[in-house]
Image (cartoon, rainbow, N blue to C red):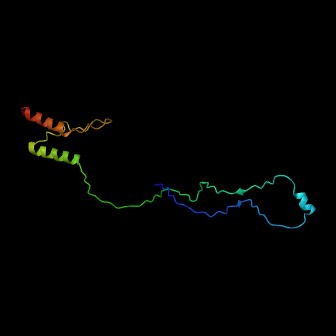
Amino acid sequence: MRRLPEHVTPVALVVNEERARIDRRPADRAATSADLESFREGTVEVRERTEEPVVQKVARVVEEVVVGREVNERTERVEDKVRRTDVEIDRLAREADESLQRATGDDALRDDDGIEGLPGEPPPRERSLGEKLKDSIKGDRQPRH
């Protein structure tokens, strides 16, 4: 915010004034040669002078304002409830396989040949639970011998 307050400031100044003054004095003496030389026909000029105060405003810097900001760091401890969802895919798949085996009563979900793969080849891909269930259902539809 910027303010411009105003107030009247009185200042005492010495002002000179020159006025012409003419005095007449009565005299009764004989004129001297100096009196006769100074008394000639002519005009005597006397100038009057007077000083007049003039108000002049000049901007002056009387104060400087520096604006800045200060950064302070602090550590605050806050707490809130958080939730986490744990998913255990392998364990659930194994339990589903086991419960399916118990329900069907056979090893329909095992690999037919039991071979893990040929030497030098990567192991066969693990079948998903959906694939195993499909195979199990197909086995139930096919006539058993």
In this rendered view, identify the residue nearer to me: 6 or 116: 6
Residue at x 90%, y 58% (from the top left corner): 37
In the rendering, at what x and y percent does residue 124 appear? 26, 37
In the rendering, at what x and y percent does residue 54 appear? 63, 55
In this view, the residue farthest toward the top is 142
Tell me if residue 110 comes above or below residue 25 in the rendering.
Answer: above
Q: Quadrant of the C terminus?
A: top left
Residue at x 23%, y 46% (from the top left corner): 90
Residue at x 30%, y 59% (from the top left corner): 79
Horizontal side, residue 41 vs residue 19: left or right: right
Horizontal side, residue 110 vs residue 42: left or right: left
In the rendering, at what x and y percent does residue 131 appear? 18, 36
Q: Quadrant of residue 96?
A: top left
Horizontal side, residue 109 vs residue 52: left or right: left
Residue at x 28%, y 35% (from the top left corner): 118
Tell me if residue 108 comes above or below residue 66 in the rendering.
Answer: above
Q: Quadrant of residue 135?
A: top left
In this rendered view, identify the residue nearer to me: 137 or 116: 137
Q: Quadrant of residue 33?
A: bottom right
In this rendered view, identify the residue nearer to me: 66 or 63: 63
